[in-house]
Image (cartoon, helix red, strand yellow):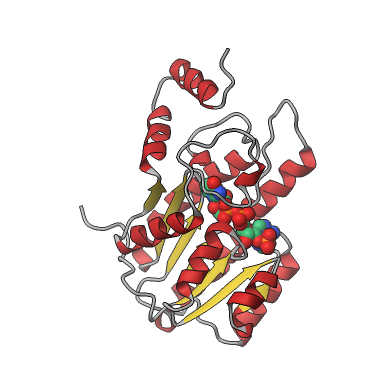
Amino acid sequence: MGKFNKPITSFKNRTVLVVGASSGIGFEISKELRFLGRKLIVVARRVDIFEKHFPQNTFLKTDIADENSMDKLFEVIEKEGLGIDTVFWCAAIYTPMSYVDFSYEQAQKITTSNLTSIYKPFWTITQKWIKDRDRFVENPHWIWISSVAGYVGLPGSCAYGPTKSALNNVAESAFVEFKPFNIDISLVCPGFVDTRLTKKNSFPMPFIISPKEASREIFNGLHRGLFEIHFPKKFTVILKMISLLPYRLFFQLTSKLTGRSK
Ligand SMILES: NC(=O)c1ccc[n+]([C@@H]2O[C@H](COP(=O)([O-])OP(=O)(O)OC[C@H]3O[C@@H](n4cnc5c(N)ncnc54)[C@H](OP(=O)(O)O)[C@@H]3O)[C@@H](O)[C@H]2O)c1
C-alpha cells in the first residue's frame, strides 16, 4: 500500500502555523521549525516565552476559545498575505476529572478549547486550500495533536477523553474527504509526555517521554507519510488492543490500568 500522505521531507517551501506553541509539545515543534520552514507563525495565549525564542512578527497572542481573538488572528493572516499551508494544531487543556466528582464549568471549558473551537479555523483554512489552490504547496497538510485518551473511555479523563475521541473521528473522516483535493491530514496520538499538562496527574505515568522525543516522533512520522503517528508503541499498542476486546475484559483492564480494580 502506498503512503497515506505526501512525505514531508523538507519544510523549506512551507509556511507553518503552530497553534498552542507556548509550551510542551507545540513549543518543541516550533523550536525545531524556526530554522526549517519558509515562515513560521506561532500562537497561544501566553506570549512571554515567544518574546525570548521567536522573531517579533512571527508570534500572535490568540485565545482559540474566544471567537473574536480567532477572527483577529485570521485578519492578520489575511492582511499580511500569509499563505499558511501547514498547520500543527497542538492546543488543548486538561484537568483530571471523574463523573463522580464533576465540574460542569470545567467540562464545558475543556470541550470548547479542545473541540468546539477547532471547526472554524479548520474550515476557514481548508476552504482556502481548496479554492486558492495555486497559492499553496502541492499538498497542504493539517496535523492534529490528539491523544491515546481518545482510543478508549478511561476513568478519570472525563471531558478531555471525549474531546480526543472526537478529534480522532474528525481526522479520520477529514482524511478521506480531503484526499481528492490533495490535502493531507495526520493524526498524532501520544502516550504520556512530560509537560505542563501531565504535571496535573498524581498517578504514575507509564512510558512517559520528553516533549523533545515527542516532537522527534512527529517529524519522523511526517517524513514517512503516515496518517496516524502514535508513540511510544509499547503503550499505544496495548491501548489499541484493549479497544478491540469484549467489554467484560475491556472493563477489567481499564479499571486495572487506572488503579480502580479491587
Ligand atoms: N502531555 C501529554 O502527556 C499528552 C499526551 C497526549 C496528548 N497530548 C496533547 O498534546 C497537545 C499539547 O499538550 P502539551 O502536553 O504540550 O500541553 P501544554 O504544555 O499544556 O501545552 C498546551 C498548549 O496549548 C495552548 N493552549 C491551551 N489553551 C489555549 C487557548 N484557549 N488558546 C490558545 N492556546 C491554548 C497552551 O498555550 P497558552 O496556555 O499559552 O494559551 C500551550 O501552548 C495537546 O493537544 C494535548 O492534549 C499531550
Q: Which residue extends farthest bottom? A: 80
Instruction: Please tell me which residue is depicted at 49% across the width and 76% down the height of the picture.
Output: 34
Q: Is residue 151 left or right of residue 111?
A: left
Decide which of 81, 202 is in the foreground and name it.
Answer: 202
Decide which of 79, 96 is in the foreground and name it.
Answer: 96
Q: Is residue 254 left or right of residue 183?
A: right
Location of residue 215 by image quarter: bottom left
Residue 103 to residue 147: above or below: above
Rendered-image quadrant of the C terminus: top right
Instruction: Please tell me which residue is depicted at 50% across the width and 33% down the height of the picture.
Output: 152
Rendered-image quarter of ligand 1: bottom right
Residue 43 to residue 196: above or below: below
The answer to whether residue 133 is visible is yes
Instruction: Please tell me which residue is depicted at 29% across the width and 60% down the height of the picture.
Output: 224
Provide residue 40's location: percent of width, then percent of height. Answer: 52, 77
Q: Which residue extends farthest left? A: 1
The answer to whether residue 177 is visible is no
